[in-house]
Amino acid sequence: MQNTRGLRSQLKDSVPVTGLCPQAGTYGVPDTLRRGFSSVKNELLPSHPLELSEKNFRLNQDKMNFSTLRNIQGLHAPLKLQMEYRAARQIQRLPFLQSSNLALDTLRGSDDTIGFEDVLNDPELSEMMGDPHVMVEYKLGVL
Amino acid sequence: MALSNVLELPASGFNFENSARNAVLEDVLGDGKTKTPKPMKTGTTIAGVVYKDGVVLGADTRATSSEVVADKMCAKIHYIAPNIYCCGAGTAADTEKTTDLLSSNLTIFSMNSSRNPRVIMAVSILQDMLFRYHGQIGAFLILGGVDFTGSHLYSVGPYGSVNEVPYLAMGSGDHAAMGILEDGFKPRLELDEAKTLVCSAIHAGIMSDLGSGSNVDLCVITRQGVDYIRPYQESEFKDQRQGRYKYKPGTTPILRENVEPVEVEVMQETVQKMDTA
């Protein structure tokens, strides 16, 4: 059987493809009802040189920091930190409301720095809100 | 408005949703007929010099938008910290916002640690921020400040390159200004010599470069404090307004005046006692 999953992980850094179908809903087929019409060109090629690097910026930073930490202090250090991150990430409001992520910010150290992500496009000031029932059902996997 | 499907909010920070649309628009509207609007650049001359007791920064005050002067009294020397100031060339909004963010970060640091920030901290934060965006943020900055390690002058480029030098000029008028600085700079200048040197460097930039003009602003930073002189030297080419644009009182003639008193009838009166016990 073809190892499509392996191929996907190789492409992940250069092309944003989630599985073989970017608009996939359940069963892996394009979910037009929920994701809208799909345009292959828009999904495959980044339209701005910074788009990919910005999308993965935090992930890459964390990866780099954790691997440095592992080299300096041993495996336990990043493991313990990642355990704390997971615990802090679970402190959330209901899915359709914006959470402050205060514990997560404090752990990351981003509670005493200001960057463009705090000034531009703040999700708390977003004008759109998902339908509460649909969002909760989606989160619980009942949808 | 609540949508009927699952909403995924875009991540905070820069949003690239419109860049595909903009690329298509440029293709369609291009052909030399219409061009996308250009951002306001500061097309500048900025310079800095380290002298005996500190740092002198200088800048012109013109901001251009393609061939039009957009702002005649633009302030290009930005406050970063009580002991650090920064001159900015390049896209006006980029330099403004980047220096604002830098200033906020350093203020938070000062509050956390009750110390004045060092110039090298400002430079490191700027370098990280600008390198992350790979030169898309067009900010060419000259940072100058005095901290307990001494007086420092750094240049930071839009890709995150950093240089520490005793005298510096940047912007579109930097060649002219650099000529003056190369000729006149000596180590350990006196305050007046340093001010004259920076002023003539900026003046050379103003005279030789179309993107620089109007007045010269100076900022002198020492251990004791900061002297922000705006303007230090006014442009000789100020024009006189030919006419007055305010209307004199009495310009509009009053044709008729009619006064009618409004009769007010008291319908209901209620008194509420205040409990002042």
Image (cartoon, rainbow, N blue to C red):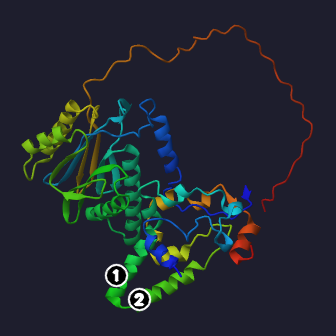
Q: Residue B180 in the image: x percent, y percent? A: 12, 40
Name the image quarter holding residue B269. Answer: top right
Whole-angstrom CA distance, mark 1 to mark 2, is 10 Å
Task: Out of A23 and B237, give the one closest to the viewer.
Answer: A23
Task: Out of A62 and B83, give the one closest to the viewer.
Answer: A62
Tag 2 subunit: A
Q: Amino acid at mark 1?
A: Thr
Q: Amino acid at mark 2?
A: Ala
Is residue B2 rendered to the left or right of residue B221? right
Identify the secondary structure beneath mark 1: helix
Is residue B219 rendered to the left or right of residue A79? left
Q: Is residue A128 above or below residue A78?
A: above
Which quadrant would the C terminus of chain A be assigned to in this image?
Answer: bottom right
Q: Of callouts 1 and 2, which one flags the residue occurring earlier in the amino acid sequence?
A: 1
Using the rendered image of the protein, determine whether residue B242 is visible from the camera's viewpoint: yes
Q: Residues within 10 Å of mark 2 (few under 14, many from 20)?
A: some
- Which of the labelled discs sits on residue A68, or is there none? 1
Q: Residue A125 in the image: x percent, y percent? A: 61, 57
Q: Do discs 1 and 2 belong to a common subunit?
A: yes
How many numbered circles does the render carry? 2
Name the image quarter holding residue A30. Answer: bottom right
Q: Which residue is at a point 41% across and 72% down the rendered structure image?
A: A60
- Which of the labelled discs sits on residue B5, or is there none? none
Pointer 2 residue: A77
Q: Which residue is at a point 37% across and 71% down the rendered structure image?
A: B113
Q: Is residue A34 above or below residue A86?
A: above
Tag 1 subunit: A
Is residue B38 rendered to the left or right of residue B175? right
Q: Which residue is at a point 74% across and 68% down the rendered structure image?
A: A134
Q: Residues within 10 Å of mark 1 (few under 14, many from 20)?
A: few
Q: Residue B172 in the image: x percent, y percent? A: 25, 40
Disc number lying in front (1 or 2)? 1
